[in-house]
């Protein structure tokens, strides 16, 4: 898949932002006044910034409101609803915390759940696609949720919770890579089933339908950069999990905490780049590519 | 509404004969010609006369080589367009309701004025049947020439999809695949018509007729062969001298 910057920025930032909102809604940390304002400003900056970035790849962003109509069948529509509801609930909760010094617990818990649900709906947009076996796995929502929770805990300064959550996220990441590398082969789809000619012999793409490129090849067949995948996996793993865990184990220091967050963010963005760049769409098979 | 209908009254679709297709790409051109000036936005080209031409097409013809375990390889031309699936994933993923399947004939269409160009329907299609038009920013796909097949302004012979009308080899057939007595359904039954990527669970309406097996050229005993063996292997006499002399030069 083409790793479009808009979706990588969107899923990375909004995942982190909704993760932070999840913890803020639970009162972790229990903040009010100016400190609450800073926390909520960061959370809203990340989540809303991410959502705005996601509209950049649309052909007609001015019609984006129509995307709220099909929540019965479409995960993308459900994501729209969940994100707006989460932002409204958490916004009201934030007003209470910042201006009134009140902690409206039930509202916060509802906002927290909606924030997690938003991350889940985002992950299901990818996980529902049978055409991309590497995404069509239960580990895809597990990965999005565990990353969001670990990053949220880190941003919220919940050191004791962040440590186990980072370890869980690291484990999910390794499992995702292991299963993902087998996913296309396990799906049973190859050029033989794609053309229906596989029972007659070995099928080979002989002549492409066009000499130039097209939308399908640009969008679905991204092979540039895959050769560095192993190195990028190592870099992303070290940045996203190893460095933050080491920094959390050291005596607490605001500079270390900031470094841990930035390192984690860079690592997750790299992992998300790989999530797209390594995903093989079955339509590539028709072109003898993957 | 992007929920799929429980069932459709008819299942209009194509039957494509891989045995007959000669790979001339006439269907590709006729499709582009008809659809760029009729239903919805035109099918744009980018850098059409430059170094990197690219454009929107609703129908494309691949060519594959099939090498059986024994015998000669076979070249198969393979036209591919929207299969108007019964369980079309491109319809249910659409967030705006722009992508829909018609109850009356099962045609999958895009309402372009509702399309936000998110591309998710193209992601969900295993067949590469949808292309986002780069000029218009909306999703384009085969309409089964919905503006021809019911068009009473056209002579009756032209009320079929443009690709079917154009095919010089008669490799493309159009009809109601939901009616077991239709010509196309009989053709599918006779020739073991098949689905593409059945494991995707899309239940395509369009069917492909596999190529017929090739004639086997058996090793034959030729009783005249001994009599036809060349008599003079080596030139003799003057020709023999000439041959040797020329070799030496």
Image (cartoon, coloured by chain):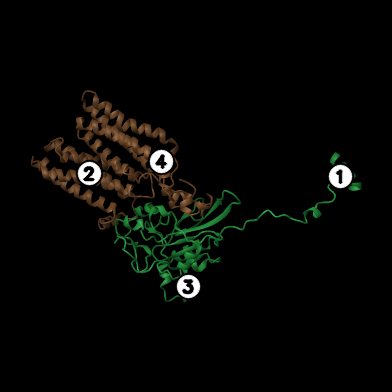
Within the image, what quadrant is residue A252 found in?
top left
Q: Which residue is mark 4?
A: A182
Between disc 3 and disc 1, whose residue precedes? 3
Is label 3 in a helix, a strand or a loop? helix
The nearer-to-camera label among 2 and 4 is 4
Which chain's colour is green? B
- The residue that label 1 is drawn on is B243
Would residue B65 appear left or right of A242 to someone viewing this image? Answer: right
Q: Is residue B155 shown left or right of residue A254?
A: right
Q: CA distance from mark 4 to mark 1?
A: 66 Å
Percent position of residue A277, x then y: 40, 42
Q: Callout 2: residue from which chain?
A: A
x, y percent for residue B236 = 89, 47
Disc on res. A116: 2
* Sequence-earlier tag: 2 or 4: 2
Which secondary structure, mark 4? helix
Using the image as rendered, state which of residue A43 and residue A162 is in the foreground: A162
Colour of chain A, in one word, is brown
Query: Are dots 3 and 1 on a single chain?
Result: yes
**Residue holding disc 3:** B158
Query: Which residue lies most toward the top here?
Result: A251
């Amino acid at each position: 898949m083409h790793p479009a910057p808009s979706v990588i920025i969107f899923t990375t930032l909004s995942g982190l932002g909704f993760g932070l909102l999840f913890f803020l809604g639970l009162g972790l940390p229990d903040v009010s006044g100016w400190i609450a304002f800073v926390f909520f400003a960061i959370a809203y900056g990340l989540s809303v910034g991410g959502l705005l970035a996601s509209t950049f790849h649309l052909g007609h962003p001015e019609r984006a409101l129509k995307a709220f109509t099909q929540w019965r069948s479409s995960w993308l529509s459900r994501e729209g609803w969940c994100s707006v509801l989460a932002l409204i609930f958490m916004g009201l909760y934030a007003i209470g915390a910042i201006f009134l010094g009140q902690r409206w617990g039930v509202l916060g818990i509802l906002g927290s759940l909606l924030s997690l649900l938003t991350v889940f709906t985002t992950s299901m947009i990818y996980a529902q696609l049978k055409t991309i076996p590497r995404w069509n796995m239960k580990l895809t929502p597990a990965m999005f949720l565990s990353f969001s929770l670990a990053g949220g805990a880190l941003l919220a300064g919940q050191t004791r919770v962040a440590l186990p959550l980072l370890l869980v996220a690291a484990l999910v990441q390794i499992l995702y890579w292991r299963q993902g590398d087998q996913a296309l082969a396990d799906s049973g789809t190859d050029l033989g089933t794609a053309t229906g000619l596989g029972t007659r012999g070995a099928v080979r793409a002989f002549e492409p339908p066009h000499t130039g490129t097209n939308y399908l090849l640009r969008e679905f067949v991204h092979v540039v950069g895959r050769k560095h995948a192993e190195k990028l996996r190592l870099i992303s793993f070290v940045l996203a999990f190893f460095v933050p865990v080491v920094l959390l184990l050291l005596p607490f220091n605001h500079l270390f905490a900031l470094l841990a967050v930035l390192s984690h963010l860079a690592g997750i963005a790299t992992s998300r780049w790989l999530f797209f760049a390594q995903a093989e769409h079955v339509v590539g098979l028709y072109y003898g590519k993957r | 509404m992007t929920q799929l209908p429980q069932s459709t009254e008819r299942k209009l679709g194509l039957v494509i004969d891989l045995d007959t297709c000669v790979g001339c790409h006439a269907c590709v051109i006729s499709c582009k010609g008809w659809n760029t000036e009729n239903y919805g936005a035109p099918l744009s080209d980018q850098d059409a006369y430059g170094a990197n031409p690219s454009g929107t097409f609703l129908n494309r013809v691949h060519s594959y080589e099939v090498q059986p375990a024994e015998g000669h390889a076979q070249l198969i031309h393979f036209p591919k367009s929207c299969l108007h699936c019964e369980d079309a994933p491109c319809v249910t993923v659409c967030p705006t309701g722009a992508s829909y399947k018609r109850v009356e004939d099962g045609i999958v269409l895009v309402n372009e004025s509702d399309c936000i160009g998110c591309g998710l329907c193209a992601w969900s299609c295993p067949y590469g049947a949808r292309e986002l038009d780069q000029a218009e920013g909306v999703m384009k796909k085969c309409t089964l020439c919905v503006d021809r097949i019911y068009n009473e302004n056209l002579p009756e012979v032209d009320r079929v999809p443009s690709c079917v009308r154009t095919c010089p080899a008669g490799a493309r057939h159009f009809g109601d695949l939901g009616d077991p007595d239709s010509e196309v359904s009989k053709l599918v039954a006779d020739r073991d018509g098949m689905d593409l990527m059945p494991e995707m669970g899309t239940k395509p309406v369009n069917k492909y007729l596999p190529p017929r097996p090739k004639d086997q050229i058996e090793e034959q005993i030729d009783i005249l062969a001994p009599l036809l063996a060349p008599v003079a292997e080596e030139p003799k006499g003057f020709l023999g001298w000439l041959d040797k002399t020329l070799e030496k030069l």
